[in-house]
Amino acid sequence: MTAHLAEPRAAAPVSRPAVRRTKPRRSWKHYGWVLFFLLPSAVPLVLFTIVPMVSSIWVSLHEWNLISRMRWVGLDNYGSLLIDPKTGRIFLNTLLYVAGYLPLVYVGGLGLAMALNRKLPARAFLRATYFLPVVTSWVVVALVWKWLLNPSNGLVNKILGAVGLGQPGWWTDPDWALVSVILASAWKDLGFVMVILLAGLQAIPKDLHEAAIVDGAGPWQRFWRITLPLLTPSTFFVVVISLINGFQVFDQVYVMTGGGPGGASQVVVGQIYDLTFRYGRAGEASALSWLLFAIILVVTVIQIRGQRKWVHYA
């Protein structure tokens, strides 16, 4: 007889209870310490940013001259602003300012960044010199440019006259007042844009340029095909920040032109100031500030959504 040995059966896998990973519970003591360390920055943020913003919404629904009691008017302030032709004019002036300021400050900042990205004698000194206007007070810069662009004895008109060119009225001429503000603003902010774009240029791998040179690419081809595409993250940041700052322009307008002559250089923030402190119409000023906030928000959202198509991250 032959014995048939039964093959051993594989042992059934032992089922183990599923282990739930639970998040560690934070004690009240932990949250207390977090709140304690946040207080030095959270308290000023709440008191000087969040509370005024919420209060301005409430003020925009009232008629108030900063002295007497507020009177409820609902959305009338917004309605009166939307049908007022002056509102459209100040928004147009602000858009014209942004349209002139943004290309000038970007192209100038990019040119400085590319020039100072090379090996130059005293390069660190030149970088600090070009950045110096950024940390200078706007009042000082505006006063200096107001003197430079003085129609009668300003340095700019003297140079233009010496070479036989016309001498504009600058901040005294309605056609040139906004141009004067744009020139002063671009000069002051060139250093900031230069630093951001210079950091972007230094982040571009040198191997790409070396490979392009080996392939026979010229300077312009390397600039258009390598530098600009890889500089788009820095460009995106500069454009967003510059647009937000451009829509909120005020200091240089207030010092150089005061919104004149004849309202030719009046901008939105300048009108908010005048409505509040010159005409005692704080409700309309608050409503105008929220209209400006809505426009800046829409423009910023469009930029953030659109950057997916043209910003290239290495």
Image (cartoon, rainbow, N blue to C red):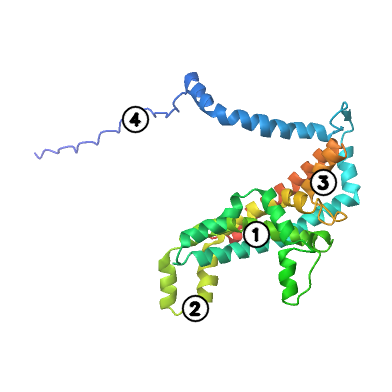
Q: Which residue is mark 1?
A: 187
Report the front residue among 145 and 104.
145
Q: Residue at x 41, y 72 (%)?
A: 210
| Labels 2 and 3 touching (C-beta < 8 A) | no
Q: CA distance from mark 1 to mark 3?
A: 24 Å
> 281 and 300: which one is in front?
281
Residue that badge 2 annotates: 218
Q: Which label's residue is closer to the chain start, 2 or 3? A: 2
Q: Which residue is mark 4?
A: 15
Q: Nearer the viewer, mark 1 or mark 4?
A: 1
Choose top left, top right, bottom left or bottom right for residue 20. top left
Disc 2 to disc 3, C-alpha distance = 50 Å
- Give, as a three-letter code, the residue at label 4: Ser
Badge 1 amino acid? Trp
Q: CA distance from mark 2 to mark 1?
A: 31 Å
- Mark 4 or mark 2: which is in front? 2
Residue 148 sits above or below residue 50 on the image: below
As drawn, 226 above or below 218? above
Helix, strand or loop at mark 2: loop
Instruction: Tell which tag, 2 or 1, sits nearer the viewer.
Output: 1
In the rendered image, residue 92, in percent from the top left (x then y), is placed at: 81, 56
